[in-house]
Amino acid sequence: MESPPKVGWTGRHAVELYVRTYTTMLQSSGDIKAESLVQAHLGMGSVLHPLAAEPQSDMGALLYAVRRLPDAIGRCRHVVMGQSPQGFRAVLGADILSWKAVKAPARRRRWYQDGTTLAVLIASNSDIDDLVPTLVAYQIEWNKLHVALQDVELAGEQARSAAGASEDDWRRLHDAWGESFDETLALIKREECKIVMRLVGGSHLGYARNASRWWLPIAAAMDELGVRDAPVYFVSSNAHSLINVLTNVARQFDTEIRDWIRRNHPELDEERRKLEAGSSRASPDNWLYYSARHLFDTHPDRERQRQRRSEMEAAIGIRHVPARRTGVDSAAQVFKLSQLDPSAIDPRVGRVDEQKLRASGACILNVDYPLGMAAYHILRQVAEQAAWIAGVYVLGKAATLNADVGDVMIPNVVHNEHSGNTYWLDNCFAADDVQPNLVYGSALDNQRAVAVRGTFLQNRDYLDFYYQGRYTVVEMEAGPYLDACYEIAQPDRYPIGESVNMARITFDLGIVHYASDTPYTQARTLGARGLSYRGMDSTYASAIAVARRILQREDALLS
């Protein structure tokens, strides 16, 4: 089997230099200044931050950073990263759980604020690889705006013009900062940004301990359902796809959803009218699933609506397990297959034999997809504790080098930058499993994926060399998951720097990515723009393929 291409020395060296710089600095027991990392950040030439070294603002990078940091970062300048509340207490003498809980719009992570200090719980070294460049990029762009805004009035168009931002980007920034927009802009004009960082802990054992704590309430939910010793179909996706595909709960709220959307979301209501008039090719079910999230998240009576939903789901063998206050901020869902209602399953899944479904002894464990190496720790923990892993299915976002936003990519080769391993797999999914339910995009199978260290930690030279080796999918979770899969199937720990044949394993294995970024065109990411209703097209086409695969596997086993 051929190996992945040798990444261009200039590009790889610049990224490795940056990673080595902040990794070694964070080993210190004191604070480090983000300013100390700026030159390494500029020298890396990140595709996500192409104007980092230029005097003009890079609004794409700023928006990306703003959406992945809590709003409090505008007032806080001290960021402390740690693995657990116990670790913070032991080293700093601080009970961070008594601080104010804050969160970022586009990155699941536990943040706590006390005055001008932010404490953040991390699940793996991937959180460090994600957080540090994001904080440095935020500081760089803040300070560019600080210089640009000195001699202008903040009201009206002067500020936007001085920042060099388009009207769309300025509106997105306004949306991201919300009510604090004017206050934040005034603060940027008044002060430079000077962030300092510190790492508390950061051991491999600490990450494994976090995963063990994350598992405990899941085990309790499985005990409650009587599936603690059942075969497990492990799915890494999100908190909304499978629950909608496998139940009709959203349909039971149809009247409330339509009324709430009509009164509060005119763009979505216009899409509904197009669907009913037959002038839109989109799926009415996808519209309902997407709109249901608005009802359950923003309705004044949302607590009662959520309680009704939970009771309906509990009646058909589903338990939700909220994320605990640990570094692993991934909620989970447990589905007892024998209690599902076949008539309620999305018709696009296909015919379900009720008699065989009732005879199934298996369950699905769906986790809200983790970041990077946290995937390894989570799946390893599940595999250690579960009676039997019947299947592993990974559905997640990725950047694409050859497709477009909304397309679906299905790899049969995955290179993991963390371990250096290249995995060759017999992916259980093919383009035909997804394309029939994909209205706006294309499904591409036989692709090659590379699991990178972080979103900022890529440059043009880096991507060019992977692309020359026909690696077209850039993501963060599949590689770590496959390292864990290796340990499920083999008698030893995952290797380092090897080509690994995963075609003959004892469980079903499938990986599907939907494109959220196109680095070569420097298109705005889904994280900067927000995931639109039509962006759900690829998500649900993929989720339907996963649900169908699991039910067909059970059907075949019971035959």
Image (cartoon, rainbow, N blue to C red):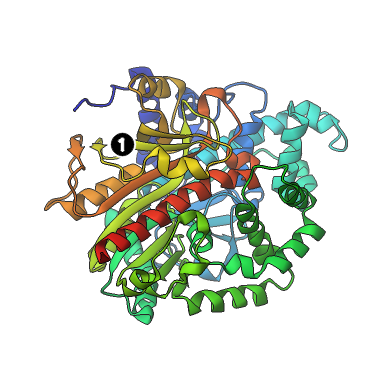
Q: Position of residue 383 (x, y in %)?
A: 25, 61
Q: Is residue 518 visible?
A: yes
Q: On the picture, is 155 further left or further right than 352?
A: right
Q: Indicate the amino acid at tag 1.
A: Asn
Q: Is residue 40 above or below residue 385?
A: above
Q: On the picture, is 13 further left or further right than 153?
A: left
Q: Position of residue 197 (x, y in %)?
A: 49, 47
**Residue at left offset 46%, top offset 21%:** 460
Q: Is residue 10 above or below residue 276?
A: above
Residue 252 sits in quarter: bottom right
Q: Position of residue 271 (x, y in %)?
A: 73, 48
Q: Position of residue 115 (x, y in %)?
A: 62, 60
Residue toward you, 395 or 203 = 395
**Residue at left offset 53%, top offset 34%:** 517
Q: Is residue 248 above or below residue 36?
A: below
Residue toward you, 123 or 437 = 437
Which quadrant is home to the C terminus?
Answer: bottom left
Residue toward you, 239 or 118 = 239
User: Going by the picture, which residue comes out furthest to the left?
Assistant: 491
Q: Is residue 122 visible?
A: no
Label 1 CA crowd tier, 10 Å (few <14, some 14–19, many 20+): many
Residue toward you, 229 or 115 = 229
Give the SS element for disc 1. Answer: strand
Q: On the picture, is 456 further left or further right than 471?
A: right
What residue sits right under mark 1 in the picture?
412
Q: Is residue 443 above or below residue 378?
A: above
